[in-house]
Amino acid sequence: MTRARAFVALGSNLRPRSVNLRTALECLRSIADVTAVSTFHRTDAVPERGVLATDPEFLNAAAVLETDLKVRGLLTALLGIEAAVGRDRTAGAAGPRTIDLDLLLFGDLVLDESDLTVPHPRMHRRHFVLEPLSEIAPAAWHPGLRKTVAELRAAL
């Protein structure tokens, strides 16, 4: 069976943020081989879709995984980890969260379905994603935009 290389963004803006990130990383290690983890980066909350950024600052990171899971299996596992770490999805996508795990890239897969889009549709516009990701995987390839993570970061 061929293993897939996946890239995941991690974020938390509810205290204890660093503990939340470390707990999520330990959970990731239980479902995949975590081959690289960025340092933790402090960032301000970013308003999206007209929502004001009133939440506390975030702590963000990125991780590289080697996994036997298929893309949907990995998504299910990420959602399970979020729930295990206390993510409350009733606050909506822009609300405060103990942990947010975003699947950024999954091998060379390009997928656009109602409940899953890979590569992540906004990763190339997010400094808080590209900064930690470029620290550990600058040569990672965005198959949709046909650019490396380093090139995407430089274009911000």
Image (spheres, rainbow, N blue to C red):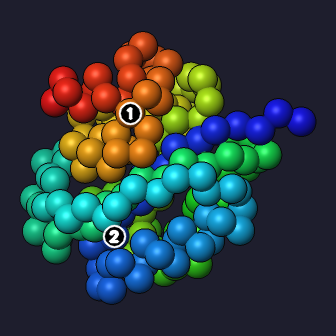
Q: Nearer the viewer, residue 147 or 38?
A: 38
SS at circle 2? strand
Neighbours of disc 2 within 10 Å: few (<14), some (14-19), many (20+): many
Instruction: Tell me the crowding category of disc 1: few under 14, some 14 to 19, or many 20 or more residues within 10 angstroms, Cα based.
Output: some
Q: Amino acid at mark 2?
A: Ser
Above/below status of 100 relative to 147: below
In the depicted structure, whether residue 122 falls above or below residue 22? above
Label 1: state its secondary structure: loop
Q: Are marks 2 and 1 in contact (CB under 8 Å)?
A: no
| Residue at 38 percent of width and 17 percent of height | 147
Q: Residue at x 28, y 67 (%)?
A: 59
Q: What separation in Å lies between label 2 and label 1 (alpha carbons)?
A: 23 Å
85 relative position to 32: left or right = left
Query: Along the polypeptide, which appears first: circle 2 or circle 1?
Result: 2
User: Can the viewer see residue 12?
Assistant: yes
**Residue at the location (70% across, 37% down)?**
4
Residue farthest bottom in this picture: 16
| Quadrant in which the C terminus is drawn | top left
What residue is shown with label 2? Answer: 12
Left or right: 146, with 83 as reference point: left
Question: Given the current orientation, which residue lies at the most extreme right position?
Answer: 1
- Residue 91: tell me if it is visible: no
- Image-based side of 60 in relation to 43, left or right: right
* Residue 71 screen position, x and y as percent: 68, 40
Amino acid type at mark 1: Pro
Residue 7 location, x and y as percent? 52, 44
Residue 46 position (above or below residue 126): below
The residue identified by callout 1 is: 138
Quadrant into which the N terminus falls: top right
Q: Nearer the viewer, mark 2 or mark 1?
A: 1
